[in-house]
Image (cartoon, helix red, strand yellow):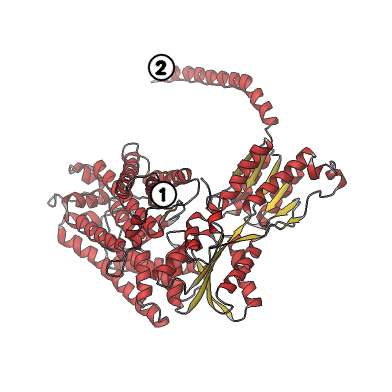
Amino acid sequence: MIRLVRRRRPQALLVAIAVLTLSISIAWFVGPKTITRAAAPAETYVYVSCVTQVPFWIDQKQALADVGKALGVKTSFTGPTTADPQAEAAALDQIIASRPAGIMVFPCDEKALTPGINRAVDAGIPVITMIGDVPASKRSTHMGINNFRAGVEGAKLLAAAIGGKGKVVVGTFQAAGVLDRMRGYKDYLAKNHPEIKVVSVVDDHADPSYAPQAYAAAIAANPDLAGIGGTDGDSGVGAARAVIEAGKKGKIKIVAMDRNEDMLNYIADGTITAAVAQKSYLETWLAVQLLYALRHNSGPGKMLPDWRAAKVNPLPEDVDTGIMPITRANVSQFRHKR
Amino acid sequence: MDQKPSVASARPGAPVRIHSGMGSLVKLLRMREVLLFAVTVALSLAISRMTPYFLTAGNLKAMLIGMVPTAIIAVGMAIVLVGGGLDLSVGSVMALSGTVAGLLMLKGASIWLALMLTLISGALIGLANGLVITRIRVNPLIATLGMMTIARGIAFVATEGFSVSGLPEGFAYWGQGSVLQVPPMVFVMAALVIAGDLALRKTKVMREVYYVGGNERAALLSGIPVNRVKVTTYMISAVLAAVAGIMLASRLMSGTPTAGIGLELNVIAAAVLGGASLVGGEGSVLGAFLGTVFMTILGNSMILLAVSIYWQGVASGLVLITVVGIDMFVRTRRGEA
């Protein structure tokens, strides 16, 4: 027994020395090169978002790829797949550590992301907030219309579709930006159309397998329902299926949001009256262009190359890109070419 | 096998009942299902008093159609739970199957070929789950959790986030056709529920699932091919999730990679409501189906009654705990738990 123990110890020691020597030599030869490489990264522009899996981001991702190719820079799109502001803040911090040339942020939650954005700007990385603002931060620009305004635009279309009066249901799900759209809907209708009553708000869980059920229940609960206003991509198909299955196509008008591919057929055949699409491609394209100009002191960055010392924001404070209403008349143009 | 003495286990009650024959097994199952049925009826009556729109043809039809994918998956989940396992990957397999079926049809495959291949892909996923759990001995929670993210990830990679639409007209039959006023998929659900329940109750092959779930060591010592039984349950679960995905894709005429996120937890809740135990050895397909009906009615009622969306989660969680709590309380009093 004692002999075995004695024999084991020298063996373990030998193994430890071998591993240590190996790792030191690897670090010696490989390490310095990788560290130097990391210190001079390729010019990268990163878009940090949340709920990153929904089709809504398709246009942004396409724009990132295209503008990256056009300008000869790297772009990437990242963030948690859930509506988790803490996870997004964590992702932002990790992106900052990789020293990109510029950051675009869709803020899942204003307060959660303010410190991260400030850290980025303090580290010399300009930040543009996309389709949702963080005004208390040091961001350069807010790009795109915010979700509240998108909801307002949807409400305008819905009011027009149902002739200015009747009962409507607003569909949403529980993520900060989408709830803002719902509030935009309700706010606009309350202020401008007293004869339109929002009888309930339906949570469709952003789940295409659940959405039709949720809207069907709302339709059953309100037999004289005139319209459904959707605030997310799944509301379109969900509401359309529910209306068709209830045999009320044409009697209940639907206004949806975003430009999900499978919703377009329902716009073409009139089940959905209109959808509110944001100019996502433009917003992203413009944002990268502005960040690039700042980085290279070209374009708008030319006149004030030392804007940091001048303590001035050389970029616009707010760029309102508006919305695109998709209707039967123009729906064929919105099909994504793949 | 019925005559063998029961082996001591961590849950002293269960093996005794199973080993003492069919009669007591049936009696136990019937208790929970009857309770659930009664609670469901009571809930329905209460809701119909609160709103006149609950018992309307339109609402009932909408609920029936809406619960088809969940009910089909619940059949598989009941079987897995009875066998002592857990399958968290079902929602993702449902989404993946819808997109796979859609992509195959877009590539030119005939509808039947696409559906066949989709079901085979479901079986392969179930096989993978089963092998990882039985051969590599990864805990079922972890194994199916991993598969959950992998399957959905594959769906996103294959579709790049787009939903797959432009599917051939004929495919709409299952989800949008009309047979006796309801889409054919309702009958598919009914057939699977009945077949699943009878199989689990009556066939020798499926009853082995109860033995494996009730006391794995005893089952192994009795000569039951435990690993094969377990792998079979996971394959059944995945294939049924694939069927659900196909039915859903037919209803929406689009394969959506985002479908059914979080569905697995609802299905597990429905199965447990219906009498399944997370430890295994208990439960029934009929119970899981009734559980699904109960949860569908609950969700439906909250929309009918315009309960604030912020409160709905609180409400459904409380009801779930209450219903299962009552049953467990009654069982403890009777000395069965």
Q: Is residue A253 visible?
A: yes
**Viewer-side label of 1, 2:** 1
Residues indicated by labels 1 and 2 sit on the same polypeptide chain: no
Q: Is residue A78 visible?
A: no
Residue at image x 49%, y 61%? Answer: A268
Quarter holding residue B19: bottom left
Q: Chain of mark 1?
A: B
Q: Residue A259 at x, y = what percent?
A: 55, 57
Residue in the foreground of this view, choosing between A165 and B288: A165
Left or right: A10, with A60 as reference point: left
Query: Which residue, given by chain and number where applicable, does mark 2 sit on?
Result: A3
Residue B81: assigned label? none
Q: Residue A4 at x, y = what percent?
A: 40, 19
Query: Which residue, given by chain and number where applicable, does mark 1 sit on?
Result: B99
Of the 4 image quadrants, the one containing the C terminus of chain B is bottom left
- Disc 1 from disc 2: Cα separation: 64 Å
Q: Mark 2 belongs to which amino acid?
A: Arg
Q: Mark 1 belongs to which amino acid?
A: Thr
Query: In the current view of this chain or complex, which residue is farthest to the left?
Result: B3
Left or right: A301, with B149 as reference point: right
Q: Residue B94 at x, y = what percent?
A: 38, 52
How many numbered marks, from 0 up?
A: 2
Q: Secondary structure at mark 1?
A: helix
